[in-house]
Amino acid sequence: MKLKNIKFNSQNIYYIFIILISFVYLRAFGDVNTFTETQYLFNYEFEFLKRGFLGEILRLTFENVNSKHIYLFSLFFLILLLIFLSKIFFFDFNNKTNIYKLIFSITILICPLTLQHFIDDIGRQDIVNLLITLFTFFLIKKFYKSNFFLATLVLFNSCIMLLIHEVSFFLFIPMIFGFWFLKSPQKNISFLILLSFLFIITITALISTNGLSTKFSYIDLNMYFLERYFFPFEIDEIVFIKNDALMVLYRDLFNSYDPNVENGIIKDTIQGAFKLDVLNTNLILIILLSPIFFIAYRLYFEFFKISNFKTKFFLISALTPLIMFLLGYDHMRWWSIFFTNIFIAIFYLSKENNLYQKIIINNVKKYQKLYLYLIPVSFLLGPVKATSTFDILAKFVY
């Protein structure tokens, strides 16, 4: 049977979605890893620490933070993100019964690099920051005529994102500014956007340099966390302390500020990026998910080719997660956020312009076999993790 002959109605879309999201959640479901869990212990109790914003909320909410609190907190934000992304990738796009649009939505929804990744990496600060990004998109669409009020909202949300995790400067904030530029009808808005972005650059530098720990040594902080969050609790409430997670508080791009922490970030990245297991991981991803690389490439450049200057700027702003390959070796995490950004941009543009929708439909028609490969393979392989690829390959590769 040819795809174009498949018939379905709008009610079927809801059934399809419920089945898909259930399978995706069950396939990718994970727990908060020890690295992420440890960083939820960063807060402002003794001094200002980078990545301490969410930990401060937890500290002010719960008298004695434990792993159950961290998990429930993380699950709340994960569910919100799944709702937002499901709306963008599925419901907003499938307002009419078109089988090719439905196949595209299904492919992106269950891709190992999108929802599955975030479900598996529950608790990661990226989830909260992506949520704030999507909420800021909503604010931009609502208040795009109010220049200075909107600038205040964008700057406030961007600063919160930087307090949550400073790498949001590369992962998400450029796309916020790109969307702001896209949606602003005023011709003189460029200067205000540029000025606002320069302000964000300054805030990023301040947080990155002034958010290091000066009151505790690396060893002392480790012992403090163990005494407060590990020893007093029962086994199901213990927060396991990951030493690597503490190192971010004792180094910047170029230097380490504690004798027990080796290397600055860039040197550590260079050493880690060329390890055999890291190279293998990237190679496996590119081979097994080569169709998604190809599809994203084709759609991106077809969109880019017919777009005006503002839209091209927005599309370019979605590419900035690639910079993180120079600053950290969570390569699978960077790939996941890169593709998620690309597809968010594609869906947003398609929603507002039928010409972009036609490009997607033609892409599915032309490369049907690639899509029909990706759907079952995505379920089989499961989620792309932060630093490794697929769990079913773990015993063979890692």
Image (tube, rainbow, N blue to C red):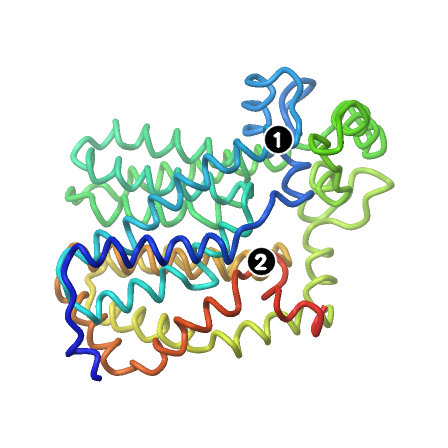
Q: Quadrant of residue 34?
A: top right
Viewer can see residue 313 = no
Viewer can see residue 139 = yes
Assign a secondary structure to mark 2. Answer: loop
Mark nearest the camera among 1 and 2 is: 1
Amino acid type at image mark 2: Lys
Q: Quadrant of residue 347?
A: bottom left
Q: What percent of the width, then of the height, locates residue 323?
A: 52, 58
Name which residue lies at 59% across and 55% down: 386
Query: First in sequence: mark 1 or mark 2?
Result: 1
Q: Quadrant of the C terminus?
A: bottom right
Q: Quadrant of the N terminus?
A: bottom left
Going by the image, does 44 lie left or right of 180? right
Q: Is residue 50 above or below residue 271?
A: above
Disc on res. 4 = none
Q: CA distance from mark 1 to mark 2?
A: 22 Å
Name which residue lies at 54% across and 61% down: 384
Assign a secondary structure to mark 1. Answer: helix
Amino acid type at image mark 1: Lys
How many labels, in total?
2
Disc on res. 385 = 2
Q: Quadrant of residue 268?
A: bottom right
Which class describes the residues within 10 Å of circle 2: few (<14), some (14-19), or many (20+)?
A: many
Q: What percent of the width, then of the height, locates residue 37?
A: 65, 38
Name which residue lies at 70% across and 72% down: 397
Going by the image, does 339 lie left or right of 87? right
Q: Is residue 244 above or below residue 288?
A: above
Which class describes the residues within 10 Å of circle 1: few (<14), some (14-19), or many (20+)?
A: few
Q: What percent of the width, then of the height, locates residue 82?
A: 39, 46
Going by the image, does 140 lie left or right of 224? left
Residue, disc 1: 68
Q: What percent of the width, then of the height, locates residue 303?
A: 25, 68
